[in-house]
Amino acid sequence: MIKSKKLFICQSCGSVYSRWIGKCEQCNQWNTIVEENISKPSGILSKSKGKEINFEKLNDVNYDYIRVKTKNNELDRVIGGGFVPGSVTLIGGEPGIGKSTLLLQLVGNLSNQKEKCIYVSGEESLSQIKMRADRIGVKNVEIEFASITNASDIAITINSKKKRCVLVIDSIQTMYLTQLDSSPGTVSQVRACAHELILAAKKTSTILILVGHLTKDGAIAGPKVLEHMVDTVLYFEGDNNFQYRILRSVKNRFGANNEIGVFEMHENGLKEIVNPSAMFLADRQKNISGSAIFAGLEGTRPILVEIQALVTQSTLSTPRRVIVGWDISRLAMLCAVLEARCKIHLSNMDIFLNIAGGIRLSEPAADLAVAAALISSVRDIPLSFTSIFFGEIGLSGEIRKVNQPELRIKEASKLGFNKINLPTKQKIIINENMSYNNLSILSDLVELIDKDNTD
């Protein structure tokens, strides 16, 4: 006999309550708790029967998989060199960012390699998919499409296939199981549907790709356990007002984390960007104060980006701090260090900081470049057009070393940068034609900028 129990579940974090409350006590989100009917077998747990487990030794386990390459170099880079058979990938992004376009191009490429591809959409009709396919040039008739939302039917169909396939579910929030009384998109449905599809994919070595919606906070909607269930989590980032898109890996059991792929949105689909550094620096202006070039590292890819700062006298009692693409807490710490250690007064200044190109930085190595941009702006001294900066700044004003400086310098050398500003402990010479400024404390950077102005 099946009993039904009413529970109140937070749609943001999955926390369960016995009654409705306005604010979730775990994630502190308002109005995210929804009533759901949960069916469970009657009886107590001790009466359930199990069976003895057969254990195996790792020496007796063999694995031999060949990655399935997508013929898209940027996507292959992000997922670690291609899809692993039986892997499950979750991709999230803002509405209209290009997730469906990317995946439709993906199955088009894989179908041309004789991979069996199935595209299931719970959001669009087949005519809508056909319109997009014609626009981006995907015309392979071997791709199988369906517009359904029953996860059990999809799992049974995949289990009946005798050959490995590539299955795209767009999106997991539209799927449902008839065994649950809750509506599609709720925590219970998302978790159960994902579990059903993942079991079918692992059993048949199917490459499963799930599309996930984002919440207003930028996280993938549904229970957090969903990200733990899958092998790879990708975020498709960008601004609808710009044509550039960034695919970022935040979890990958078969490759490096924080790897990025850069694309450009065109009328006929997404195009790969071969040299992202040149793209991000394309509109850079000469002899402008407050501009510094940071040699960063995203996964295994070195990338150069322009950091722009504007520091002006504030007319407000609480000066403004407007940041695009960087952590506001990190900026507050850096301003405090500049004021305490270098006597550069910023407490009564409005500060506007922008990472040009729409990319978001999280690497502490950007501290030195941000500090250089702030000092350049407040002193109104343009930095050298061929200088790059990287280094982490501590609370005592020391400049700490960062990982893989060789890759950063080599990338800068390719684009004509010949003045390298880096921590003292990293004395690396890649090219003798370059000049290296080894900085130990933040005041060294201030003296360097003042010296360049006098020269």
Image (tube, rainbow, N blue to C red):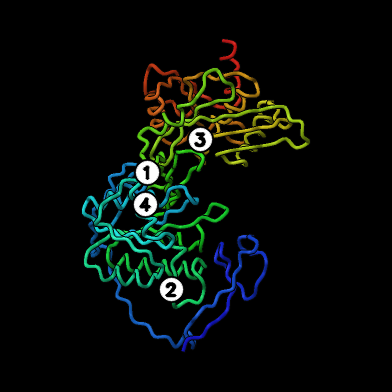
Relative side of 327 to 283, left or right: right
Q: Are marks 3 and 2 in contact (CB under 8 Å)?
A: no
Placement of 213 over or under 184, stated as above or below: above
Residue found at the very far top of the displayed protein = 455
Describe the element under mark 3 as helix, strand or loop.
helix
Marked residue nearer the N-terminal end (3 or 1): 1
Residue named by callout 3: 365
Residue 123's tag is none
Secondary structure of the residue carrying tag 1 is strand
Three-letter residue code for mark 3: Ala
Helix, strand or loop status at disc 2: loop
Which of discs 1 and 4 lies nearer the camera? The answer is 4
Q: Mark 4 or 2, which is nearer the eye?
A: 4
**Vertical comparison of 402 with 443: above or below:** below
x, y (%) of residue 408?
41, 31
N-term mark: 3 or 4? 4
- How far is the residue under mark 3 from the one under mark 4? 45 Å
Q: Which residue is mark 2?
A: 177
Q: Residues within 10 Å of mark 3 (few under 14, many from 20)?
A: many
Residue 262 appears in the rendering: no
Q: CA distance from mark 4 to mark 2?
A: 29 Å
The quadrant in which residue 335 appears is top right
Q: Is residue 119 left or right of residue 211?
A: left
According to the picture, the residue beneath numbered tag 4 turns out to be 131
The C terminus sits in image quarter? top right
As shown in the figure, which amino acid type bears the numbered disc 1?
Gly
Considering depth in this image, is 128 or 186 the residue closer to the camera? Answer: 128
Disc with the residue nearer the chain's start (4 vs 2): 4
Distance between mark 2 and mark 1 Cα atoms: 33 Å
Q: Earlier in the sequence, mark 3 or mark 2?
A: 2
